[in-house]
Amino acid sequence: MQTFQSQPAILVLEDDPNFRRLLKVALSREGHTVYTAADAQEALSLVRQEHSISLVTTDNKMPGMSGLEFLYEVEKLAPRILKVMISSTSEEELKPHLEQPGFLFAFHRKPARISEVIETIRMALSVVERKAQRAG
């Protein structure tokens, strides 16, 4: 797959350093600029600073602020950013949030296959690209 410098940036919020690194490597190979954060506060700082971020991935169960709380903050700061959750939290627990139209682009249950997560991110970013083409 050919990659371009203009690929959308992605923020990976994950408290597990091995999974965070794995996602960063896989997404970087796709040609994306990838920002990583180990906690929600660090991730929110990046959302405020890096306006090129088009998509965030997050775990839900993390020390401090949960992934859901983080996503609600992202929604307030930059509603245009697409959100993907990768978590061991059950879909049943997240059901009220998953059913909110437009809030969460996708949910992957851990242990997640990286190839499936990457495909979801490709689909999400194609939505971003189509919106940009229509607007431009």
Image (spheres, rainbow, N blue to C red):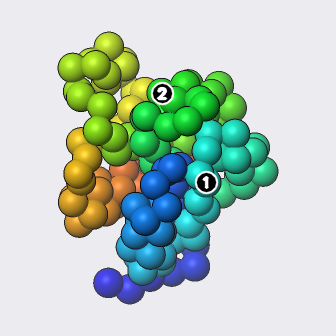
- Disc 1 marks which residue? 37
Question: Of all residues shown, which one is farthest toward the front?
Answer: 63
Residue 46 falls left or right of residue 22: right
Residue at (35% x, 56% y) in the render: 121
Which disc number belongs to residue 16? none
Residue 47 visible in rendering: no
Q: Position of residue 99 (x, y in %)?
A: 29, 19
Relative vertical location of residue 59 with respect to residue 50 in this rendering, above or below: above
Q: Amino acid at mark 1?
A: Ala
| Quarter of the figure with the C terminus | bottom right
Question: Of all residues shown, which one is farthest toward the bottom?
Answer: 2
Q: Where is residue 90, by image quadrant?
A: top left
Question: Of all residues shown, which one is farthest toward the top?
Answer: 96
- Secondary structure of the residue carrying numbered label 2: helix
Relative vertical location of residue 84 with respect to residue 64 in this rendering, above or below: below
Q: Where is residue 64, by image quadrant?
A: top right
Relative vertical location of residue 130 with respect to residue 88 in this rendering, above or below: below
Q: Nearer the viewer, residue 17 or 94?
A: 17
- Disc 2 marks which residue? 68
Task: Classify 10 Å Cα crowding around label 2: few (below 14), some (14-19), many (20 and above).
Answer: some
Q: Position of residue 110 (x, y in %)?
A: 25, 47
Residue at (56% x, 66% y) in the render: 34
Q: Amino acid at mark 2?
A: Leu
Q: Nearer the viewer, residue 117 or 37?
A: 37
How far apart are labels 1 and 2 at the CA level?
A: 15 Å
| Quarter of the figure with the N terminus | bottom left
